[in-house]
Amino acid sequence: MWWKHGVLYQIYPRSFMDSNGDGIGDLRGIITKLDYLNDGTEKSLGIDGVWLSPFFRSPMRDFGYDISDYRDIDPIFGTLEDFKLLLREAHARHIHVIIDLVLNHTSDEHPWFQESRQNGNGVTAHWYIWHPGKNGRPPNNWFSQFELRSAWWYDQQRGEFYLGTFTRHQPEVNWRNASLRKEMFDLVRHWLDMGVDGFRFDVINWFIKDDQFRSNPLSLRDVDLHKHIYDRNRPETIDICRELRTMTDSYKERMMVGEVYTDELDIASSYYGNGTDALHLVFDFDFLFQPWSAGRMCKSLVEWYAKLPAGAWPTFTLSNHDNLRHCLRYAKGKWTVARAKVAAALLITLRSVPLLYYGEELGMSGGRLRREDLVDPLSKKTWPLRKYRRDLARTPMQWDGSLNAGFSNGKPWLPVDSRFPSCNAEEQGKSEDSLLSFYKRLIQLRKKHEALKSGDIQFKVEYLPNALVYVREHETEKVLVVLNFTARRMSLNPPTLSQRIEVLLGSHRVVGETLALDQSPDIGPYEIVIGKENRGK
């Protein structure tokens, strides 16, 4: 299973590479950079699959997460033939392609919704969640995530309220309706038949809503003061996941990863089903939101591993298109790059599918944006409370030191980070000490050692304070990972393990060097040691 042991890379198409000078990234731009991702040599990043954020036809009120045609490509990204070419070129380089399907809601400009709002008798009349309301008011207290008010919107044409949990322009579909459900499954099959290797399902845990439309209880613990028990994570959603799994598994080597946006581990892990009959992978957002703390991260990881049912495989990420980049969140003056290397080593050596977000291999942070630069509806609505986080996470890829960081000959849709003359792929590719070169070596190391790809993991919290130390083991191979999360020197004194470790990769040591554990070696500030047990010395 390629997806189980590979490294995935998320591309936000608007921001990756612009091929026609309009300031917006596109599919042909991605094609020109496939060799950067994996050209079959150690000169490339070496990833195994890409997840493409939505490129479907859309009015772009939420930058592609409001789809008006699931079977066509939006012209700003190219054509259907461009996508088919991207598939062929990616597959020729052994890069698998995962596409982002948004099946919880559509655009209000989708023909389905336009027909549904006309009357209550058409084919799509019940394809969306409509309600007459109560005494002229919304039926319950369900809340809009982006517009920060009721999620119910009154439609004059139909004379009813429809549900739009994100914005008024993203009406939610009714997965309880059999004909809508069939249409959605036909869409999944359509893209599988075209040759895509898998799907990232947007907010999959929101698909089913309470059939009695009960109000959510209030909660001081949650950001929006609502405990979301009736508008998401309904038990019927797992049944949909199982149906999708059956369909996906009927094709060779395909996969699904679900965005289950919750910090409740029991709920998130339930979307694996029994471990082999629902989603192949589920994002762990509890880990993504951890602060720079070895103890907190270790606790989060151990708890998530413990929640996984037998047969389930985890996936971890530290950045994505909805949250501030981790290189910004974890920045620490002169230690920022050192921390970024520690984060990289952690992500790529854990027992999981590591998911990288474009540009994190360069240390991209997004820079600074003025209020007038903001384009994202959520960033505008919550300025400055959430630090315009989504726009900062989506700034153009920094390819080189030329105009607009080599991203576009035109004016980029978002400003390029002003640090690009020194923080770019071309410049970092020249240095063995750069963050990019370190990512390349990490990924190659993972490919070469079965213990790092598929081995068990044991955390050794007693070895070092304020550090993460763990052993990956597969059959006869053991690999020790030591990650110092601080600027302080430490003494490594493991009570159990071979007395000598051969360094496979280190931030302070030479490959092949022997680390004598019986001599309690010093571990330097933010030092990384990845080594294999060497019984022969």
Image (cartoon, rainbow, N blue to C red):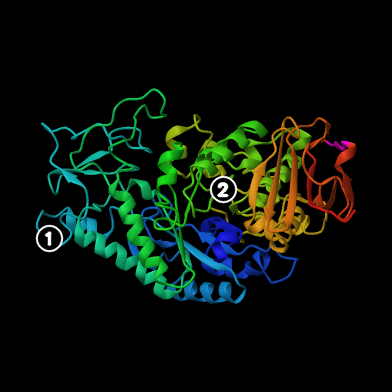
- Which image quadrant for residue 48? bottom right
Residue 122, which numbered label? 1
Q: Main secondary structure of the magenta part?
A: loop
Residue name at image x 46 percent, y 48 percent: 309
| Dot 2 alpha-carbon crowd within 10 angstroms: few under 14, some 14 to 19, many 20 or more | many
> Relative to 79, is 164 on the left or the right?
left
Disc 1 secondary structure class: loop
Residue at position x 23%, y 56% in the image: 113
Query: Of the numbered discs in the image, which one, if any, rests on residue 316?
Result: 2
Look at the image and say whether residue 504 sits in the magenta stretch: no
Mark 1 or 2, closer to the camera: 2
Q: Is disc 2 placed on a helix, strand or loop?
A: strand
Q: Is residue 22 in sight in this rendering?
A: no
Mark linked to residue 142: none
Looking at the rendering, in which quadrant would you find the N terminus?
bottom right
Is 502 placed left or right of 133 in the picture? right
- Decide: few, some or many residues near mark 1? Use Cα within 10 Å; few <14, some 14-19, many ≥20: few
Q: Residue at x 30, y 68 (%)?
A: 186
Residue name at image x 68 percent, y 58 percent: 475
Q: Position of residue 425 (x, y in %)?
A: 72, 57
| Residue 415 visible in rendering | yes
The magenta segment: 520-524
Q: Nearer the viewer, residue 295 or 48?
A: 295
Find residue 134 and report its image quarter.
top left
Q: Which is more N-terminal, label 2 or label 1?
A: 1
Relative vertical location of residue 368 with respect to residue 4 in this rendering, above or below: above
Q: Which amino acid, mark 1?
A: Gly
- Alpha-carbon distance for marks 1 and 2? 43 Å
Q: Residue furthest top?
A: 220
